[in-house]
Image: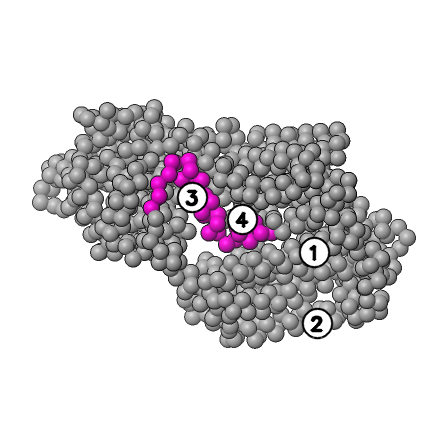
């Protein structure tokens, strides 16, 4: 089912609160891509990601994850997807290892595989010393790392992250970026939102920019530079130019 | 303690917060129109006065004379009130120690930490006294109407008792902190508070059961044994009761004693209080582990994983542990009834079933709120590859398992004595738990577990429905155990309340459908896509 299909295929996705949050959005992400979704505050990034993760029902449109219709078979789609919200939600009274154990149980992993993956992630994210401490005393950065470990422990094909680097110190941010790049090298697809444009510039193979719930620009960094007419400029300049003036991508 | 400006600033800040808390409690954080709030408040006040009238009027027909027959039950009620106030004050003092909230802001400002402590202690006394006056106002007014305006002095006695109880609470909490340290005091203080709150009422019930084979506190207070033990009418022991009746010397003594106690504690303990707040702040950042043991990684099936997660979190929640202890505590008198009536041929189910249903219904409601609305990682659960029904089932099973652990021993004991009553208890407890859980599902929201204390204020309707159903089912269970067909009446009332809750509940269809936070377009947590 996951063979030749795009990692993510969105068609006509819409969500309206008191105003349209996502407006007829079309988006394709290829397997193994590192995709950054950028946009100003309130552009609809988080709403889009929550709909992809199956946490919010769209008003219209379709979502395909590796060929699985996420609206018709949400359980099947979730089995290969991981979601990390911007505010890490973990259990204060569980230890990181207990948290990973819970995730492994929910995703029905084999115990040996799960334990190996959990201990590896704990070491990779430098949580070894706190592996048996309850999360209640953890800083936001540590919580973020625990949440990320939870997202990765079941080896998802599609990893969706909302502002994963917010609140992390430089060292922790580097660790997280390395872990995510390693997953992409291993064949996973990463979609993230970030306000740190340097991260998108350095890591993302493709970048989508949305404003008012609509995709206003999409492509590689070079594509976006060409489109903005600023061939030597930084992503920040390109972003400001395209998001400020851009028309929806046809 | 530094001077006025700090105190005034912090006091104004506290008053504003207290007013907003009270407003939120009255309006359940919804934007009600003022006239609707006034209408319901008036109705509630009128009903409270009617209840008070029905209780007090028969005793006042021949005029109320402060003899032993009146002093003993009134004194008992006053001790009960004081125990509840002390329990609440200990709980609140502990909460101030550990809750960060705005304390980080206040303590990091140039404002004197002692002033912050002094105002916080005063605020606890004010809150505790205010709540007790609200609860007792109808009784005080009816007493004044039937037996003379001097009984309005009770409005001065209650704040005095509140000041005394707060002063004692600060001393108890500081002692516990010194004795057990920052890490353990929170749990121990909550347990001490729960035990003090329930000890007197449970103790009196237990004494009534053991001495008279009955449950009535009033009858117990008026029994010959208690009357014989009670001090003489002129004893100083009765001054707090005489203060209630407005006798000048006792009234002044009680007010001065309460004020001096609180003032003394504020003056002599505010520095210690502030240092404890800072120490507790450091403790909340201390890491708590599993004692250095290597964690044995175990992966189970999703339903069992979820169930075990809920139980583990419940066990690690000190507040909940103390609340559960309270529920179990209330089961001691009915257990004593079973013990004393064993082999006597009586039917203890008439008393045991209602108490058991009340205790387990309340417990189930609290646990259901924790598992359904107090989910700290809703996104994780919602994004897991599980059908919504499976998640729901695991959560309901977690509640049922915890309630069963409390209820089953009593039901088994009851079965030895009366299998019929045990069957009735089992059925009624199961229905009460299912009803309380269903209400929490219909009114579920998204909150953190730490908001458990405020669960009643977030949905006043849910809290009222839960209480109404539990009380009705307790009545139905008692009558059924007695073998009366009248049991159908409260059972029908419970069904009616459930129907109303289902209609009013924002998630009240299948229990799994998503709903949106009213009017804000903000999606609330759900178990699965619609």
Q: For the point 68% across and 61% down, which residue is it?
A: B82
Residue name at image x 34 percent, y 24 percent? A72
Residue A53: x and y in percent read 32, 34
Q: Pinpoint residue B164: horizontal percent, then vertical percent.
A: 65, 67
Q: Give the Cα separation between the discs numbered 4 and 1.
A: 28 Å
Which structural element holds mark 2? helix
**Mark 2 and mark 3, same subunit?**
yes
- Measured as percent of width and height from the top left, residue A75 is found at 34, 29
The residue carrying mark 2 is B256
Q: Which of marks 1 and 4 precedes in the sequence? A: 1
Q: Is residue A208 left or right of residue B359?
A: left
Q: Sequence order check: which comes first, mark 3 or mark 1?
A: 1
SS for dot 1: helix
Name the residue carrying label 3.
B309
The residue that disc 4 covers is B454
In the rendered structure, which disc, 3 or 4, sits on the residue that comes first in sequence?
Answer: 3
Residue A30, percent from left and from top: 18, 31
Residue drawn at x 11%, y 39% is A222
Chain letter belonging to callout 3? B
């Amino acid at each position: 089912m996951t063979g030749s299909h795009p990692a993510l295929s969105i068609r006509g996705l819409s969500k309206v609160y008191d105003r349209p949050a996502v407006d007829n959005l079309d988006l394709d992400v290829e397997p193994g891509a590192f995709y950054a979704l950028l946009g100003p505050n309130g552009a609809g990034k988080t709403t889009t990601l929550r709909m992809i993760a199956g946490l919010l029902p769209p008003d219209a449109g379709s979502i395909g994850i590796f060929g699985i219709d996420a609206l018709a078979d949400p359980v099947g789609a979730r089995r290969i997807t991981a979601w990390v919200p911007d505010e890490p939600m973990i259990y204060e009274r569980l230890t990181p290892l207990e948290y990973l154990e819970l995730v492994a149980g929910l995703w029905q992993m084999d115990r040996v595989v799960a334990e190996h993956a959990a201990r590896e992630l704990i070491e990779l994210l430098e949580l070894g010393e706190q592996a048996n401490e309850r999360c209640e005393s953890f800083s936001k950065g540590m919580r973020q790392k625990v949440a990320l470990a939870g997202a990765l422990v079941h080896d998802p094909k599609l990893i969706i992250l909302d502002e994963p680097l917010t609140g992390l110190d430089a060292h922790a941010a580097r660790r997280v970026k390395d872990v995510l790049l390693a997953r992409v090298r291993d064949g996973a697809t990463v979609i993230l939102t970030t306000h740190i444009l340097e991260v998108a510039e350095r890591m993302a193979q493709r970048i989508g920019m949305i404003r008012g719930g609509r995709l206003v620009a999409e492509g590689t960094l070079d594509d976006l530079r060409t489109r903005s007419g600023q061939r030597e400029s930084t992503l920040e300049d390109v972003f400001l130019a395209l998001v400020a003036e851009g028309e929806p991508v046809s | 303690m530094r001077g006025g400006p700090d105190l005034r600033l912090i006091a104004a800040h506290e008053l504003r917060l207290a007013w907003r808390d009270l407003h939120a409690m009255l309006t359940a954080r919804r934007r009600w129109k003022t006239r609707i709030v006034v209408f319901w408040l008036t109705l509630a006040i009128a009903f409270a006065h009617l209840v008070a009238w029905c209780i007090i009027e028969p005793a006042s027909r021949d005029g109320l004379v402060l003899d032993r027959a009146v002093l003993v039950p009134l004194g008992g009620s006053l001790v009960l009130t004081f125990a509840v106030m002390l329990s609440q004050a200990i709980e609140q003092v502990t909460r101030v120690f550990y809750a960060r909230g705005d304390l980080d802001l206040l303590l990091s400002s140039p404002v004197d930490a002692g002033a912050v402590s002094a105002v916080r202690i005063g605020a606890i006394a004010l809150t505790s006294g205010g709540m007790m006056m609200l609860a007792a106002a109808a009784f005080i007014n009816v007493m004044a109407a039937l037996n003379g305006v001097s009984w309005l002095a009770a409005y001065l006695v209650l704040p005095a008792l509140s000041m005394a109880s707060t002063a004692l609470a600060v001393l108890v909490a500081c002692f516990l902190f010194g004795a057990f340290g920052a890490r353990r005091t929170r749990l121990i203080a909550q347990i001490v508070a729960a035990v003090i709150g329930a000890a007197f009422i449970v103790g009196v019930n237990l004494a009534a059961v053991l001495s008279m084979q009955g449950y009535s506190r009033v009858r117990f207070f008026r029994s010959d044994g208690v009357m014989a033990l009670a001090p003489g009418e002129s004893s100083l022991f009765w001054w707090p009761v005489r203060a209630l009746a407005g006798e000048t010397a006792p009234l002044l003594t009680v007010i001065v004693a309460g004020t001096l106690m609180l003032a003394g504690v504020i003056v002599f303990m505010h520095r210690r209080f502030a240092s404890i707040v800072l120490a507790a702040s450091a403790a909340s950042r201390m890491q708590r582990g599993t004692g250095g043991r290597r964690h044995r990684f175990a992966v189970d099936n999703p339903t069992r994983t979820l169930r075990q997660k809920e139980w583990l979190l419940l066990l690690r929640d000190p507040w909940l542990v103390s609340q559960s202890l309270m529920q179990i505590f209330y089961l001691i008198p009915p257990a004593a009834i079973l013990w004393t009536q064993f082999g006597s041929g009586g039917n203890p189910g008439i008393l045991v079933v209602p108490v058991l249903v009340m205790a387990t219904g309340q417990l189930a409601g609290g646990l259901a709120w924790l598992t359904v609305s107090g989910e700290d990682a809703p996104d994780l659960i919602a994004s897991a590859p599980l059908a919504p029904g499976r998640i729901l089932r695991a959560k309901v099973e977690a509640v049922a398992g915890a309630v069963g652990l409390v209820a089953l021993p009593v039901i088994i004991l009851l079965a030895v004595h009366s299998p019929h009553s045990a069957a009735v208890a089992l059925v009624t407890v199961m229905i009460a738990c299912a009803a309380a859980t269903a209400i929490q599902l219909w009114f579920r929201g998204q909150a953190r577990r730490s908001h458990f204390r405020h669960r009643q204020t977030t949905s006043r309707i849910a809290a009222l429905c839960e209480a109404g159903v539990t009380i009705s089912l307790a009545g139905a269970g008692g009558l059924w155990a007695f073998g009366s067909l009248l049991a159908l009446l409260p059972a029908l009332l419970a069904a009616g309340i459930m129907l109303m809750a289902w209609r009013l509940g924002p998630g009240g269809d299948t229990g799994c459908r998503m709903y949106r936070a009213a009017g804000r377009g903000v999606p609330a947590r759900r178990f699965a896509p619609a």
